[in-house]
Image: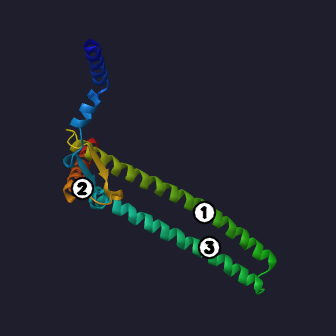
Amino acid sequence: MKKVLFAALALVFAVSCNNAPKTTTTEATEAKTEVGASDLAYVRTDAVFAESEIFKSEGVALQAKNEKTQKNLAEKEQKLQNEMVQLQEKYQKGLITTIEAQRKEQDLQKRIAAYQESAQKQLRSLEEENMVFQNRMGDLMQRAIDEINADGAYKMIVNATALLDASEELDITSIVLDKVNALYAADKAAAKSEK
């Protein structure tokens, strides 16, 4: 009886040992790669964008060009609308003949169509310039972050635009800004040497 009881206990012990939670290499690795505060960082990308040398030298000029183009297009559109209103008023007051009004309206319609085509071309060109600038800025920022984290010191770097709360110790914005400016200066120097 003792042999049977001892054998049963040995069997229960063996089964319980086999069912015990095993520490797998994945769990051990996860324990080793647990993310700590020093492994996290955030970047205020809007600040990098606004304070960068590329924005100060090229972005501000592009913004001014956008505003000037929008203003000029709005003024031209308003002028054409005013001409159409004046033409209708002259016709309604009987100051011009129907044939003259039709001829002037056709001329005005042609000018409106030419304006719209020109405006679309200008807006497409501006949109392309803006996209190229934003792509260049994004490329500089990504290259800067890649260089800063080349050693893998950070397990996660996030954009602070969606950040609700974080310690200022995790803010690497100034480091990224400095690196973006250095990369931009190097790119400008390389472009000058190619010419």
Reply above or below: 37 against 3.
below
Q: Residue at x 81, y 77 (%)?
A: 98
Q: Nearer the viewer, residue 37 or 104?
A: 37
Reply above or below: 11 against 70.
above
Which x, y percent locates residue 29?
24, 32
SS type, badge 1: helix
Measured in 3D between alpha carbons, the distance from the residue under mark 2 to the one under mark 1, in whole angstroms, is: 43 Å
Q: Residue at x 31, y 46 (%)?
A: 142
SS type, badge 2: helix
Q: Which residue is mark 3?
A: 80
Determine if residue 53 is in view. yes
Measured in 3D between alpha carbons, the distance from the residue under mark 1 to the one under mark 3, in whole angstroms, is: 11 Å
Amino acid type shown at disc 1: Gln
| Location of residue 31 (image quadrant) | top left
Measured in 3D between alpha carbons, the distance from the residue under mark 3 to the one under mark 2, in whole angstroms, is: 48 Å
Q: Residue at x 30, y 61 (%)?
A: 50
| Location of residue 116 (image quadrant) | bottom right
Determine if residue 191 is in view. no
Which x, y percent locates residue 194?
28, 41
Tell me the number on the disc at residue 116.
Answer: 1
**Does residue 188 appear to the left or right of 103 in the view shown?**
left
Amino acid type shown at disc 2: Thr
Q: Residues within 10 Å of mark 2 (few under 14, many from 20)?
A: some
Q: Reading the chain from its start, which is encountered first: label 3 or label 2? A: 3
Q: Which residue is mark 2?
A: 173
**Residues under numbered marks 2 and 1 in contact, where contact means CB atoms less than 8 Å apart:** no
Q: Reading the chain from its start, which is encountered first: label 1 or label 3? A: 3
